[in-house]
Image (cartoon, rainbow, N blue to C red):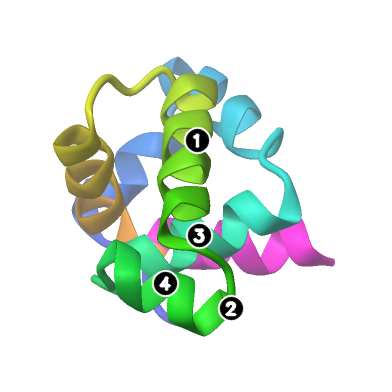
Amino acid sequence: MTPVSENASILLVDDYQSINQRLLQLTDREWDVLSFITDGLTTAEIAACLVIEPKSIENYKRRISKKLKIGGRSNLIRFCIVNRDYLRKLYILARK
């Protein structure tokens, strides 16, 4: 088991349970997109992997940001990078 990074572990604190609840509300496709963002892929690369239009990826990003209450594309990317290890673990749990 990979240890959770120091930055990601902040989400485990009781004060951050609301973000955990919001993350668990993402659809499977939103989780796929979030996972690819976490891996550092661009919109075009994600679209190619999922065989959908880049515009659809942008729509997914907007929905994810809205559900997580994260304003702006750069803040979503920053959130994914900072919490990469934690999001990967939660992704696995959410898919079960």
Give left or right: position of 47 versus 40: right
Q: Is residue 80 visible?
A: yes
Q: CA distance from mark 3 to mark 2?
A: 12 Å
The answer to which of marks 1 and 3 sits earlier in the sequence is: 3
Q: Are marks 1 and 3 in contact (CB under 8 Å)?
A: yes
- 92 or 48: nearer the viewer: 48
- Packing grade of label 2 (10 A; few <14, some 14-19, many >=20) is few
- The residue range painted magenta reads 86-96
**Occupied quadrant, residue 26:** top right
Q: Which residue is mark 4?
A: 46
> Quarter-wise, where is residue 52 in the image?
bottom right
List x then y, in percent, for residue 3: 37, 72
Q: Residue at x 52, y 43 (%)?
A: 60
Crowdedness of circle 4 by 10 Å Cα count: few (<14), some, many (20+)?
many
Precedes in sequence: disc 2 or disc 4 = 4
Q: Is residue 7 above or below residue 50?
A: above
Secondary structure, mark 4, is helix
First along the sequence among labels 3 and 2? 3
Q: Which mark is residue 33?
A: 3
| Mark in front: 2 vs 1 | 2
Check disc 1 and report its element: helix, strand or loop.
helix
Kindly indicate whether the residue at mark 1 contacts the one at mark 2 (C-beta within 8 angstroms).
Answer: no
Could you say which is closer to the camera, residue 21 or residue 63? Answer: 63
Q: Earlier in the sequence, mark 4 or mark 1?
A: 4
- Could you tell me the amino acid type at mark 1? Ile
Look at mark 1 in the image and give the residue it sits on.
Answer: 64
